[in-house]
Amino acid sequence: MPELIAAVRAKKAISFIYRGARRTVEPHAVGVGHDGGVWLSAYQTAGHSVMPGQDWVYCKVDAVESLQEVPVRFLRTRPGYSREDSRFMRFYAAL
């Protein structure tokens, strides 16, 4: 989780495997969901999508595998992002 928090704060893209598929994302928030688990909210820029056309992904952090930093920084939040995301009870890092 420290790598995810650092990526959010530095606005650095990351790549990882989730549900058996590699994804590249711009992480926007890491925090505690209503189930008590730690979740990542991110804008997907490349890789497999569970649902075609779905740009935003909400991933359970303990299911994220093979996390890698991508040498790409993003400058601003993507459309559709809200720091008041009701899926989170509290944030560890958020844009």
Image (cartoon, rainbow, N blue to C red):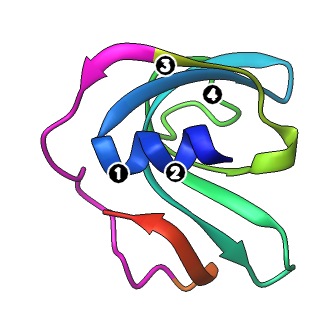
Q: Alpha carbon of mark 3 to alpha carbon of mark 2: how far?
A: 12 Å
Q: Of callouts 1 and 3, which one flags the residue occurring earlier in the amino acid sequence?
A: 1
* Up/down of 18 relative to 61, above or below: above
Residue identifier under label 1: 9
Q: Label 2, secondary structure: give it.
A: helix
Distance from the alpha carbon under mark 2 to that under mark 1 = 6 Å
Q: Give the labeled residue for mark 3.
A: 69
Say whether residue 91 is visible. yes
Secondary structure of the residue carrying numbered label 4: loop
What amino acid is labelled 1 in the image? Answer: Arg
| Position above or below: 43 against 94 | above
Q: Which residue is mark 4?
A: 49
- Select label 4 or label 3 by which is in front: 3
Q: Earlier in the sequence, mark 4 or mark 2?
A: 2
User: How far, Cα to Cα, is label 4 from label 2?
Assistant: 23 Å
Q: Disc 2 marks which residue? A: 5
Where does residue 1 sit, x and y in percent of width and height?
68, 47
Three-letter code, disc 4: Ser
Q: What is the distance, in whole Å, between disc 4 and disc 3 at their CAs?
A: 19 Å
Toward the left, the furthest residue is: 75
Q: Position of residue 85 (x, y in %)?
A: 47, 79
Q: Are marks 1 and 4 in contact (CB under 8 Å)?
A: no
Q: Residues within 10 Å of mark 1 (few under 14, many from 20)?
A: some
Query: How many neighbours does mark 2 have within 10 angstroms: few (below 14), some (14-19), or many (20 or more)?
Result: many
* Magenta residues, start to end: 70-85
Name the magenta segment's main secondary structure.
loop
- 41 left or right of 27? right
